[in-house]
Amino acid sequence: MEIKVLKNILDANDHIAAQNRKLLKEKNIMMINVWASPGAGKTTTMLRTAEALKEKARMAVIEGDVASSIDTVTLSKAGVTAIQINTDGGCHLDAGMVDTALQNLPLDELDIIFIENVGNLICPGSFDLGEYKRIIIASTPEGADKPHKYPLMFTIADACIINKIDLAPYINFDAENFTRTVTGMNTDIDMFQVSGITGEGIDEWSDWVLKQLDSYRK
Amino acid sequence: MEIKVLKNILDANDHIAAQNRKLLKEKNIMMINVWASPGAGKTTTMLRTAEALKEKARMAVIEGDVASSIDTVTLSKAGVTAIQINTDGGCHLDAGMVDTALQNLPLDELDIIFIENVGNLICPGSFDLGEYKRIIIASTPEGADKPHKYPLMFTIADACIINKIDLAPYINFDAENFTRTVTGMNTDIDMFQVSGITGEGIDEWSDWVLKQLDSYRK
């Protein structure tokens, strides 16, 4: 019975995700679902990405959090179009929440929507939101063993950002070993080494985003 | 219907948690449930705690992970009694999993059991495992805003360790501000600043553990 209920929930989610995907295709907007642990640097990466894409694409961010609107305030202050979803204890976004957010965004003025999912390396991986691409942000202080411990997201993501690369000299983090582990689990994944603080690697990362937008619109 | 099923699951969990609690009381063993984000330093803290308690209490660790047994191998190599639970995708431990682990630990030779829950700041907070105390480990690179975004665990934990305090000079982390936020949400919580790498603050933390053991056994 529990399994049946879970299946119903996932079926309903997939149905709304397909509707979101269709709407975005009509509007010619690419949506990217962003996964990460709490504090891996999702919002800082979004800020840097918005700076890099400023003259090249119009972007917005859907902010998913258990509580608070701190990140939406941060993004809005920096001039980035952002909308907050609070899950009130929920551990992931679902397609219905994203549907509501889409209805409240100026879709005719956008090229790219990023979804900052709830900070969680497990649950968000099971919920399709209607996105075109999925990315995971890992940060160096979390340690190089995370892909072994939380394999699902690393296995199904389209790109992986290793963030906080500026902290690598102060901690025991082997970026090459980490990259080998992830590309071993997922041969199609694209890897980036980035610092949201210094801006290192942001150009390569934002070029990847624009390349996806080209593919999406072809 | 979904809500009813969830309630049934939680009721069943609470029933097993109460059994675990009763068993541990009979065996005079204190159990502590440890929560944290992925990569906050749970295992390193466990290693340091085991060193500090070596002559004072006999401890074991129940290791919860989505996949892999990396941490159990690390602890076992260091001579710490440890047992692995893999949740196979599950985002938290439940009382039944801990029951199974308890049946496989040498309970007559233990004073303290730590449960390293799955790295997740949301889901584990809703599941009683039969523990006496609950602690949360936050790490400085995650940022000082985490209690606002993931309030439940910070509100119900008995102690909070701020780990990776050695990295504070390299990042923008205000430990006093963080402490004010957490103690504002939870006036009964005890706060510790610790480095699992340098050992700073481990004596104060392990003294707290021994004080809880005294209270538990009174």
Image (cartoon, coloured by chain):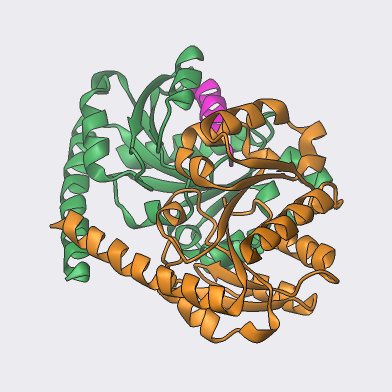
Chain colours: A green, B orange
Q: Which residue occupies 42% across, 75% down?
A: B19
Residue A50 visible in image: yes
**Could you tell me which quadrant the N terminus of chain B lies in?**
bottom left
Residue B144 percent across, percent down from the top left? 62, 31
Rendering quarter of residue B214? bottom right
Q: Magenta span covers which residues?
A: A40-53
Magenta residues, dominant SS class: helix
Residue B173 vs residue B126: left or right?
right
- Residue B125's place in the image compared with A43, above or below, is below
User: B134 or B22: nearer the eye?
Assistant: B22
Rendering quarter of residue A193? top right
Q: Which residue occupies 55% across, 36% down?
A: B146
Total label count? 0
User: B91 or A72: nearer the eye?
Assistant: B91
Residue A58 percent across, percent down from the top left? 39, 21
Residue B146 vs residue A144: left or right?
left
Magenta span contains residue A97: no
- Residue B211's place in the image compared with A95, above or below, is below
Residue B140 percent across, percent down from the top left? 69, 39
Magenta span contains residue A50: yes
User: B162 or A190: nearer the eye?
Assistant: B162
Rendering quarter of residue A33? top left
User: A73 or A109: nearer the eye?
Assistant: A73
- Residue A180's place in the image compared with B145, above or below, is below
- Residue B37's place in the image compared with A70, above or below, is below
